[in-house]
């Protein structure tokens, strides 16, 4: 089936009317292999795979990269087609936000205002609002989100559960370059020198995870402090390198809890995030 690109909600709804199993992969475009791997997860589970391409102004802070975020529609559509996507929904801002979006989804602050939400105020309100709206438009049976955005995935899972949305959320494992760097649309901003340095973020997460396993959770404050010093010494500006409970992203309190190491740090002007389940 040749891929089809639609720009309007009415067109999309008409195209999906008879489909029994809509699989959905929302994106902001500027796609890489990680996105295509999410499409490949949706493909065998869906009668039709829809991907959205929409750079969502609501989730960008005033000093973030909304204007310089790359718009690469033609290449994105070809790549989606090669991965098995059937339909691309690419609305413009007038279609998705015809009036200022006054009704918003506010995830609970104990999850939305920590980690990414602490350093990017309002980010998860923007994400939850657009994802809820896209779910209402596409009405998928399943949706696939990358595990690289660990907190985003958790917030969307919780939103779907608490709002009783009839959508199965599937986590796609993080796709990495051979040197360990998590694929991200923002990697394209890195200079050659920064690109060579960038895998150190994941290397440090691996080191933190190994130390937690060897030294236990009593050592977590020291492990976090050492990691922050180590990355700063390499010239990065870290926002957080931390060990949290997988269940709610709060600091660990008991030895047998499943944990995750999470990191966000700026290399030059590019902010990278990554995580590793322990
Ligand atoms: O992860 C992303 O690319 C975005 O946050 C999403 C889920 C497409 C919402 O704009």
Image: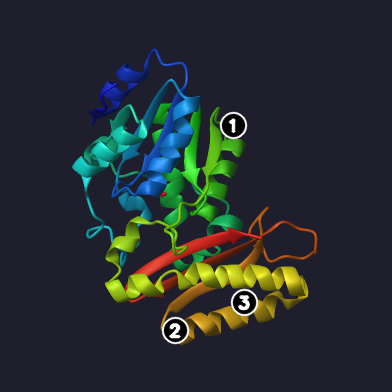
Q: Are marks 3 and 2 in contact (CB under 8 Å)?
A: no
Which label was assigned to residue 224?
Answer: 3
Extreme-bottom residue of the structure: 233
Estimate the x, y position of residue 34 in percent, counting from the top left. Answer: 41, 48
Name the colour scheme. Answer: rainbow
Q: Residue at x 68, y 73 (%)?
A: 211
The 10 Å Cα crowd at callout 1, few under 14, some 14 to 19, many 20 or more, is few
For marks 3 and 2, give the one nearer the viewer: 2
Extreme-left residue of the structure: 74
2 or 1: tag closer to the N-terminus: 1
User: Can you say whether 240 is above or below 116 in the image?
Assistant: below
* In-front residue for pair 38/196: 196
- The CA distance from mark 2 to mark 1 is 46 Å
Write down the residue under mark 1: 164
Find numbered disc 3 in the image and state the secondary structure of the residue it sits on.
Answer: helix
Q: Are marks 3 and 1 in contact (CB under 8 Å)?
A: no
User: Can you say whether 149 is above or below 47 in the image?
Assistant: below
Query: Taking 218 as reference, is 56 left or right?
Result: left
- The CA distance from mark 3 to mark 2 is 16 Å
The 10 Å Cα crowd at callout 2, few under 14, some 14 to 19, many 20 or more, is few
3 or 2: tag closer to the N-terminus: 3
Query: Taking 267 as reference, is 224 left or right?
Result: right
Write down the residue under mark 2: 234
| Location of residue 224 (image quadrant) | bottom right
């Amino acid at each position: 089936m040749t891929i089809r690109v639609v720009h309007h909600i009415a067109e999309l709804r008409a195209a999906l009317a008879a489909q029994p199993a809509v699989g959905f992969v929302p994106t902001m475009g500027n796609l890489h292999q990680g996105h295509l791997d999410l499409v490949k997860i949706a493909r065998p589970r869906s009668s039709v795979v829809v991907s959205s391409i929409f750079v969502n102004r609501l989730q960008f802070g005033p000093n973030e990269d909304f204007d310089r975020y790359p718009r690469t529609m033609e290449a994105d559509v070809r790549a989606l087609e090669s991965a098995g996507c059937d339909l691309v929904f690419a609305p413009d801002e007038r279609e998705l936000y015809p009036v200022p979006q006054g009704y918003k989804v506010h995830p609970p602050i104990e999850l939305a205002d920590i980690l990414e939400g602490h350093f990017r105020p309002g980010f998860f309100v923007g994400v939850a609002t657009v994802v809820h709206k896209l779910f209402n438009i596409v009405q998928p049976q399943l949706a696939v989100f990358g595990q690289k955005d660990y907190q985003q995935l958790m917030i969307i899972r919780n939103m779907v559960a608490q709002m009783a949305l009839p959508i199965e959320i599937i986590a796609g494992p993080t796709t990495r370059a051979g040197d360990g760097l998590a694929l991200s649309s923002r990697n394209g901003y890195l200079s050659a020198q920064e690109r060579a340095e960038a895998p150190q973020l994941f290397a440090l997460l691996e080191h933190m995870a190994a130390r937690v396993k060897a030294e236990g959770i009593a050592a977590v404050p020291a492990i976090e402090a050492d990691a922050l010093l180590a990355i700063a010494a390499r010239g990065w500006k870290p926002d957080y390198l931390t060990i949290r409970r997988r269940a709610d992203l709060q600091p660990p309190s008991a030895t047998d809890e499943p944990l995750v190491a999470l990191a966000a740090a700026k290399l030059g002007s590019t902010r990278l995030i990554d995580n590793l389940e322990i």
